[in-house]
Amino acid sequence: VGTAGGTLGHLVASAVVSTGRSVVALTPDEKSARALEADVEHFFSELARERRPRVLRYPEHDLPPYSALRPDRRNVLERLAVMSELLRSAGSPVALVLSASSVRRLVIPRTSFMERSFHLEFAQELERDEFLEQLDQAGYRKSPLVEERGTYAVRGAILDLFTPSAEEPVR
């Protein structure tokens, strides 16, 4: 849709709020995706004050498609966090903002992603070694101190875990 200024953000936010369904917005580049994300967030705050829908921006890869280099771990975790949030918000409307470059690569199939995902409850008891194996299989890195997303630390029966979608680690 050819629009100027924040019109597209208003259009996307209005569509989500009025239909109660999710909307996917594709932009030509990452800069315009970030701007649209901010616009939609602003209009959600104006249009849906009580049950405000989420805006998710799926970031582009930090490397060209056929690069021999490994992608930046933070970028990978940011992409995984968006995928995780999409699964968690099933049934709740979201505005998903994508740049053309962010969708030029394949992503892990939904079933494979779900097989490697897990949900933890407060005070849930786990089989320690089995859960640590599950973390390793899901791509988490063991570290002595948990300071960045995608890492975990074990000290006896205490586990510190920093998931891709969390703001802070949990114990």
Image (spheres, helix red, strand yellow):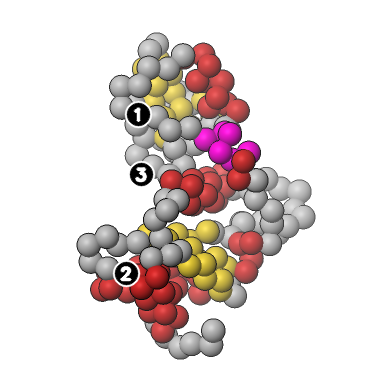
Q: Is residue 169 visible?
A: yes
Q: Is 91 inside the magenta-drawn segment?
A: no
Q: Which secondary structure lies at badge 2?
A: helix
Instruction: Kindly indicate whether the residue at mark 1 contacts the one at mark 2 (C-beta within 8 angstroms).
Output: no
Image point 39% across, 26% down: which residue?
A: 160
Q: Position of residue 57 (x, y in %)?
A: 48, 61
The foreground one among 23 and 20 is 20
Residue type (three-letter) at the residue carrying disc 1: Glu
Q: Is 116 inside the magenta-drawn segment?
A: yes
In the image: residue 79, left or right of residue 5: right
Span highlighted in magenta in the image: 112-117
Question: Disc 2 to disc 3, how far (Cα)?
Answer: 22 Å
Farthest residue toward the left?
A: 50
Is tag 2's residue or tag 3's residue first in the polypeptide sequence? 2
Identify the mark at residue 160; answer none if there is no mark. none
Image point 59% across, 75% down: which residue?
A: 28
In the image: residue 65, left or right of residue 90: right
Q: Which residue is mark 1?
A: 121
The foreground one among 84 and 18 is 18
Q: Which secondary structure lies at badge 3?
A: loop
Q: Which residue is mark 3?
A: 167
Specify the quadrant of the image occupied by residue 56. Answer: bottom left
Is tag 2's residue or tag 1's residue first in the polypeptide sequence? 2
Q: Position of residue 110 (x, y in %)?
A: 60, 45
> Closer to the observer: label 1 or label 3?
1
Q: Count of labels shown?
A: 3
Residue type (three-letter) at the residue carrying disc 3: Glu
For mark 2, does the 10 Å Cα neighbourhood hold few (<14), some (14 to 19), or many (20 or more) residues? many
Above/below status of 161 relative to 81: above
